[in-house]
Image: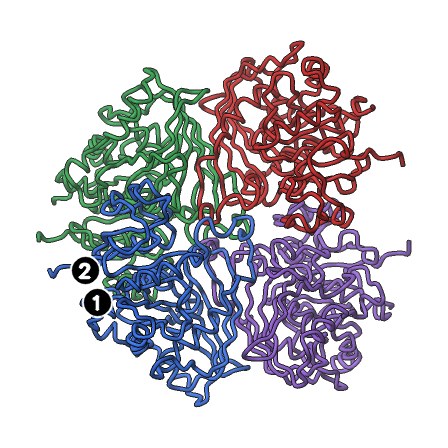
Chain colours: A green, B red, C purple, D blue
Amino acid sequence: MQTRIEVGILGATGMVGQHFIKFLQGNPWFDLKWLGASDRSAGKKYKDAMTWHLAGGTPDSVAGLTVDECKPGNAPRLVFSAMDAGVATEIERAFAQAGHVVVSNSRNHRMEQDVPLLVPEINPDHLKLVPGQQRARGWKGQIVTNPNCSTIGLVMALGPLKQFGITKVIVTTMQAISGAGYPGVSSMDIMGNVIPFIGGEEEKMEMETQKILGDFAGDRIAPLAAKVSAHCNRVAVVDGHTETVSVEFSSKPSEADLRQALESFRGLPQERNLPSAPPRPVIYMEQANRPQPRKDAERERGMAAFVGRLRVCHALDYKFVVLSHNTIRGAAGAAVLNAELMHSEGMLDS
Amino acid sequence: MQTRIEVGILGATGMVGQHFIKFLQGNPWFDLKWLGASDRSAGKKYKDAMTWHLAGGTPDSVAGLTVDECKPGNAPRLVFSAMDAGVATEIERAFAQAGHVVVSNSRNHRMEQDVPLLVPEINPDHLKLVPGQQRARGWKGQIVTNPNCSTIGLVMALGPLKQFGITKVIVTTMQAISGAGYPGVSSMDIMGNVIPFIGGEEEKMEMETQKILGDFAGDRIAPLAAKVSAHCNRVAVVDGHTETVSVEFSSKPSEADLRQALESFRGLPQERNLPSAPPRPVIYMEQANRPQPRKDAERERGMAAFVGRLRVCHALDYKFVVLSHNTIRGAAGAAVLNAELMHSEGMLDS
Amino acid sequence: MQTRIEVGILGATGMVGQHFIKFLQGNPWFDLKWLGASDRSAGKKYKDAMTWHLAGGTPDSVAGLTVDECKPGNAPRLVFSAMDAGVATEIERAFAQAGHVVVSNSRNHRMEQDVPLLVPEINPDHLKLVPGQQRARGWKGQIVTNPNCSTIGLVMALGPLKQFGITKVIVTTMQAISGAGYPGVSSMDIMGNVIPFIGGEEEKMEMETQKILGDFAGDRIAPLAAKVSAHCNRVAVVDGHTETVSVEFSSKPSEADLRQALESFRGLPQERNLPSAPPRPVIYMEQANRPQPRKDAERERGMAAFVGRLRVCHALDYKFVVLSHNTIRGAAGAAVLNAELMHSEGMLDS
Amino acid sequence: MQTRIEVGILGATGMVGQHFIKFLQGNPWFDLKWLGASDRSAGKKYKDAMTWHLAGGTPDSVAGLTVDECKPGNAPRLVFSAMDAGVATEIERAFAQAGHVVVSNSRNHRMEQDVPLLVPEINPDHLKLVPGQQRARGWKGQIVTNPNCSTIGLVMALGPLKQFGITKVIVTTMQAISGAGYPGVSSMDIMGNVIPFIGGEEEKMEMETQKILGDFAGDRIAPLAAKVSAHCNRVAVVDGHTETVSVEFSSKPSEADLRQALESFRGLPQERNLPSAPPRPVIYMEQANRPQPRKDAERERGMAAFVGRLRVCHALDYKFVVLSHNTIRGAAGAAVLNAELMHSEGMLDS
C-alpha cells in the first residue's frame, strides 16, 4: 500500500469532530494523526478531553493522541474543519494563510465568492475557484467547503435534473436531532413533537442550493437562477434528514426521463472510484413508503441520497422524497469525499 | 335549560367512535343516548364491547349503555357516523333513507356531488346542497360530511385568504399517529422514523380542499380552480397534524394583509356562539418556533387552527405553518360543530 | 368567598416555578401575588423574564406581574420554593428567619433532622417537628418540604401497607424527562433509549422513603427500619414516573388484605377535603397492563398514585407497579397540598 | 475453505426469520439454502413472499430462493426454527422425528424436561440431554432451544456469579419493541409511554433462568434453587433489553470478586473461537450511565451482554444493570451460536 496522507481535525472534541474521527477509520488514503481543539482541551489525551457521543466508542488509534491547539505549525498540511461557526472564520483563514488545505464542514466560508461549496458528484468544476482564492487572498493554502446537512440531499437529487432546466423548487425538511449537535435539542422540545423552525437553516438551504447548482464563471459561481423555497422542521428522528420536494422545469421532461436521470446518474467520484464514494450517488427506492430515515439512512455507508415517490405535482411539475444521512453525507463524509476528489485532482500534492 | 337533542353514534366502539363519545361529554345541545356498532358488539354493555383507548377512561354515562345494531329504527334522528370506510356507504344511506340526519366523519360520501363537505367557518352555504340531495335520492333524511383530518387545518388557514385569489397551494403534512386509529401504525414503523406516505391521503387533501373552498352552484359545488399539491407524511407525534404551506395568489396581498385576514377571521359558528366553536377559528402564534403539536394542539379545546411563521415564499408568494388537532377538529369535533351549525339553521327541527 | 391567602414563589422563572404557577391557577385558598427570581430577572414583567415551557401558555394573571428579587421583605408570608439546589439553602433559611412560611420543593432541607418531609396523607404528624425547628434555629418562620418526584409514588403506595410491617423494598423507576427540568435531558441521550442512571436519585429515594414512613420521636423522625434499594432509570416519557416495587413484610398479609388496604386508604387531606386533595390518594387499576404514564398520569388532576398488578413476588412477598405524576404530585402539587394541610392545621394564621 | 453446512429456516418470512437470514450472512460454517414458511408463501420467491422489515434490505443471495412448505424432506438436516408458538410444537417435532437437527428459537419446547435450553457460555453440558431425548422420543433428530430474549441478558450476567451461591434474584426489564415482532406493539400504546406488562414474559424469565443455571442430572436438569422474581415492562426502544438486577448470595462475595468474575468470564464458545462468539461474553462498562440500548446494544455484533453499575444493594446483596440485544443474542444469534457449539461437539456430523 502507498503511504497514506497524514490529516488533522480542527475542532476534534465536538460532535462533528467525533463524526470525522469515526468516518476516517479505515480510510485508505488518509491517516488521522493530529487533533486540534480549544485551549481547554489542548495537552490532554483525546479520551480525557471529551465525552464520546457516538455508538461504538472512541477508536483506539485516536483515544491516546494528545490534543493540540488550533494553531498552524504542528498540524499536517490537510486539515478537516469541524469547528463551531463562532470560531471557524479566523482559525480556518489562519490555517489557509499558513499553507494548509482546509476542507471545512463549517458554514463560515461557504457563501464567499471565491470558496468552492463542493459536492463532488455535482459541481467538481467549482474547484477551479481555488487558484483565484489563493491569488486574491495571498494564501499558499486554501479553503474548500461542503454544504449544510439539509442542502446535501436536495442537491444530490436535483443535480441530475439540472439538464431539464430547474426553475422553481419548494422543499420541506424533516430533520434529525443529530444535526443540532450535543446536547443540542432538548428532549422536552422534540419528544412526540415537531419543531417547525431551525434558525438560519432555510436561508442556508436556499442560497447553498443555488450556488452548488450554479456555473463556474471565471472568478465566481453564477448561481442557478431557480427560485428555491425551504420549510425546515425538526422531527423526532436520530439520524437522516427526509425532504419532500416539488420542482418546476423550463423543459418539462417525462416522468420516465426524470427517473432515468436519477437512476443513471454517476459523477467523478464514481468514475474515479474514490474510497468514500457510494457506487451510485442516488438510489431510487421503488416501495411506496420509502425512503425512511431509520431504515434507510445508513445504507451505502450513509453516503448516497435515497429518492422515492417520484410523481406528478399538481402545482409545479413533479414531486418526490429524498433522504440523506445528515452527519455522514451531510457532514464528515462530505468533507472527506471532497478531500478525496481534491487528491484525485492532484491538489494535495505539495 | 332547554331539552337537549338525543343523538347516537354509528360505529361507537372504534377509535373515532370513542373520540365522539369523549367530545360529546358536556355538550349543552346534544345528549348521547344511543350507540350503534357491529353485530358482534350489539347487545353488550358498551364497556364490555370495546377496549377504551383514550386518556381518562370511558365516561360513566356511556359505559352502561347497551350497544345496538347499526340499523335505523331505535336510533335517534341525529346520528354521528364514525364508521369504517368499508361499511359506511350502505349504512349511512340506509339511515338517511329512513329519515335520519347523518353527520358523518367517514370519507365515503364526501366527494359526492350533492353532499356538503362542511366546515362551518368556511363554507356554511354548502348546506344548501341538502334539499337537492333529498330530492334526488328520495330521502327524508340527509348526509352531511366533514373533511379528512389532514384537510381541516389547511382549509381553515386558506379560507380567510380565499379573497386574495388562491391559485396554487403546495402543502407538506407531518401527521400524528392517532390519525391511523388503533392499532394503526406499528411502533416498528414509526419510532424514531418518518413514513413519507399515507395511502390515499394526498388525493383526499387535494380534492377536498378544492371542494370546501369552492362555490355553491345550484346543485353542486364548483371547486376552487387552484392547483393543490400535497405531500403526506407520518411522524412520531401522538395528536396534531403539522403542515407547511406555500401559496400563490392572483391578487398578491401584502404580508400585513394576510396576517390581518388570518387574525380577524370569524365565521358563523363564532357569530352564533355555537357551543363547540372556538372563539377564534385561527390563532396566529408569534413565536418563531410555533405552533408545535405536543404543546399547542390541545389549546382551545382542540377546535382552532394554529398558524405561525407567515413569511415570503421565494417560489410561490407566501408560506406558513398550520397545526390542527386531528382527532378533535379533524374528526369528532368537526362533526359535532357541523351538527351545531345545522341546528342553528333549524335543520334538526323535525 | 373568604379572602384568599396571598402567596409567592421563590424561583418563579424556572420549570418548577412554572409548574407552581400553573397548578395554583384556580386554587380557592391561595392567591398568587408575588414572584421571586434571580437578579437577572428582577424588575422585569414575568412574561419577559422567562420562556414558558408548559402546554397552554402563561396565565394572564401572572404574565404581567413584576418579578422581584428573592429577598424577604416584599414577599407574602407564605412562599413556595421552586429554587435550584445550588441556591436554595441560604435563601430558604433567610426567608424562614424573617418569618416566612417556606413550603419547599427543593431538596436542600429535606433530610435535616428538624424539617418535616411531608406527604399529607402519609405523615401529617411530622408537622410536629416545626415548633422544635423554630426554637432550635431561632426562626419565626419555618421550612416544610415535600419529597423527590421519584419518592412520592412509592411512599403513597407503601403508606397504607406500613401496618403490615415493611422490612424490605426493592424499587426500579422508569422516570419521565420532565423530572430533569429544561433543557434537561438531551434528546440525543434519551430518544429510543434508556439511561440507567440519575445522579443522586437512588440515595434520595432510599433515605426519603425511610424518613417519610418513619415515626415522630419528639425532636426528630425515627426512620422506618426497612431496607430500601432503588434502581433509577430515565425513559422516553414526558410526564409520569412508573415504578416496579417488590416488598417484604414482617407480618405477611394476604393479597386481599393488601388490595383492601390500598383501595380503602384515605388520609387527612381527604377527610378535610383539602382543595388539591384527590378524592382517593391511591387508585388501584384492574387492567393487566396499567397504570401507564401517557394514559393515566394526568387522571385525578395528577394528584393520585396509580397502582396496578399487585401479585406475589417469588423473591420477597408481593410486587406491584405504581405511577405518579412527577411534576404535579411529585413537585408543585405536593407543595401546595402541604400548604393546604398546614392551613387546615391553623399554621398559616399569623 | 472447508465446505459449509447447508442450513434452512422454518418460519423464514416472519420477523424472527428475517433476523436469522440477516445474521447468517457471512457465516463461515453455515450456508443458508432453504426457506420454509406457511402454505401461503410456499412456491413464491422469497422476496415476493414477505415484506422485509429490517434495515439494509433483503440479502441478494436469499431474495431469489423459492420458499418451501414447512415439511421435512427437502430441507437440509440442520434447520433453525423461527416459527410462531402457535404452530411450532407439531412442526418442530415432525422435523426432529424425520432426523433433522432443530435449533429453535421458539418457546414451545424450552421447558420440556429432555430438551436443552442452551446458552453455550453458561450451560454447554445441558447438551447431554440430547441422547435421552432421542431415546425417549424415538427420534433420529433432536430439538435444542435458546432462551427468551428477556432471559438471555440475565443469565449471561448471573452465570459467572453462580459460584457464589445465588439465592434470590429480582429483575425489572425495560424491553424493546422489536421483541414483539411485526406489527407487534401499536405506536398508540408505546409512544412516550411504558407498558408495565408483557403476557407470559415474567413466568418465562423466572423458570428459564432456573433451568439454564441448573445442573445436568442424568435425564433432566435440576433447576437452580434460587428464588427469581421478574417485573417485565415494554419501553420506547427499538432494539436492546435493559434490566436492573438485585441478587442475594449464600456466600456473599466482595464487590471486587463479583467484578472480577464478570470481567474474566469466558466460556466454551470463546475457548473454541466459534464464529459467532463474542470475544468476551460479558462486557463491563465503567461509565456511571451505561450500558444504554441505543448506544451499546449493537456493539460486539450484538452477541455480548453489557453490564454496568455494579454496587451494593441495601435490600439484597448487590445490584447492577445488564443490557443485551434482544433480536440478536436474544434470538437469531443465540440459535446460530447454539448450532456452532453443537458442530464443535460433532453433533452435526451425520
Question: In the image, is D242 to the left or to the right of B94?
Answer: left
Q: Are marks 1 and 2 on the same chain?
A: yes
Check residue C236 in the rendering and tell me which mark sits there, or answer none. Answer: none
> Height in image: B145 above or below C52?
above
Residue A75 visible in the displayed image: yes
Which quarter of the figure is the N terminus of chain B placed in? top right
Chain at numbered mark 2: D
Disc 1 residue type (three-letter) = Leu
- Write the residue at 38% across / 58% down: A53
* Residue B26 picture location, percent across and down: 79, 42
* Residue A201 picture location, percent across and down: 43, 37
Instruction: List the residue tagged with mark 1.
Output: D348
Instruction: List the residue tagged with mark 2.
Output: D5
The crowding category of the residue bearing disc 2, from other C-alpha atoms within 10 Å (few below 14, some 14 to 19, many at least 20), is: some
Residue placed most toward the observer, B247 or D172: D172
Q: CA distance from mark 1 to mark 2?
A: 9 Å
Question: In the image, is D136 to the left or to the right of D312?
Answer: left
Q: Are marks 1 and 2 in contact (CB under 8 Å)?
A: yes
- Write the residue at 48% across / 35% down: B198
- Write the residue at 22% across / 54% down: A75
Disc 2 residue type (three-letter) = Ile
Which residue, as the protein is rendered here, is positioned at the far top?
Answer: B218
